[in-house]
Image (cartoon, grey):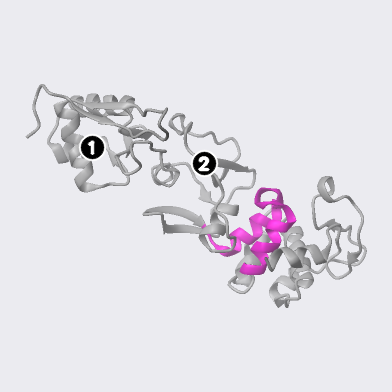
Amino acid sequence: MISEKTPYTFTAMATSPNQMGPTRTLSRREAELVSWLEVERPKSVSLAEISSALDWPQKRTYSVTSRLVMKGWLHRTRAGHYEPLLGESAGILVPNPWVALTSWKVPHYVALSSAAYEHNLIPDRPGAVQVCVPIGTTAPAGWQELAIMLVPRRAFRLDGSRLTEAHGVTVRLAGIERVLLDSATMPGRVGGVFGLARIVDRGHKQADWRRFVELAKKTTRGAAAARRIAALLEILGQKVPPALAKLASAKKGAAPIYLGSTRVHGRRGEILPRWRVQLNVSPEALREEVTR
């Protein structure tokens, strides 16, 4: 039985003998809410859900949740919505960016390297969740500690993304076609041309290339992205799908585009005539990268 007067105390385990984690005390009401969260295990919870479940008036619910936020038991993801921070990680807890995204109402989708990892197109998970958003979007005030990187897009579109189950929650995730297109449009966001080569090598057989072309035609620099992907497929010894080849084939005399960043790789290299892509990166190095 929980005493009305005796506070419960939670002490985070130390990460080293010389470090002590924060002490997190609980009043009776606070312990009642934390106990309910421990049983129900919601990924996120709202003031209305807490009030209904515990039969509390709105004023009490707001007061208790506010104190639990200050004590480190809850993390506010947006107004009236929280992520429980319970004891699974010895009390040393980092708010979950995936949970925060589920309650964000701004149009967005998980993209680039983060989406590529979810589709098993790259072996390493990025340190922060990359999220494409309309230009001018700012992160909510409660996201300072979250590992979320906003990628503003002037011509933002949700096409090519869909609601998907990931990490125990539902988020809007870029499909493979959108991952390929965004990555080829912004290779610097996926580790440059070498990161793009890995994504193309793993993703080309899974992609619906007609769908890719539909998306590319609606996207600024979509045709250039198609040319870059076609060039990589040729370098990697893969067949270029007809739908992609039709879009990527450059007109005679068209200005070449560089395969890799000129700032990193310079401007020298042969030009693949069909795509008008200048190979300023060693094809051998790219092939070696994708076979690691």
The Cα–Cα distance between marks 1 and 2, rounded to whole angstroms, is 27 Å
Outermost left residue: 1
Q: Position of residue 2 (x, y in %)?
A: 9, 32
Mark 1 residue element: helix
Where 207 falls versus 196 (above or below)? Answer: below
User: How many other residues sit within 10 Å of disc 2, few (<14), some (14-19) or many (≥20)?
Assistant: many
Task: Please give the residue where the numbered disc 2 appears in the rendered image.
Answer: 148
Query: Is residue 275 rendered to the left or right of residue 58?
Result: right
Give the amino acid type for the residue marked by disc 1 in the picture: Ala
- Magenta part of the chain: 174-202
Dot 1 or dot 2: first in sequence order is 1
Task: Please give the residue where the numbered disc 1 appears in the rendered image.
Answer: 48
How many numbered circles does the render carry?
2
**Magenta stretch: helix, strand or loop mostly:** helix
Mark 2 residue element: strand
Which image quarter is the N terminus in? Answer: top left
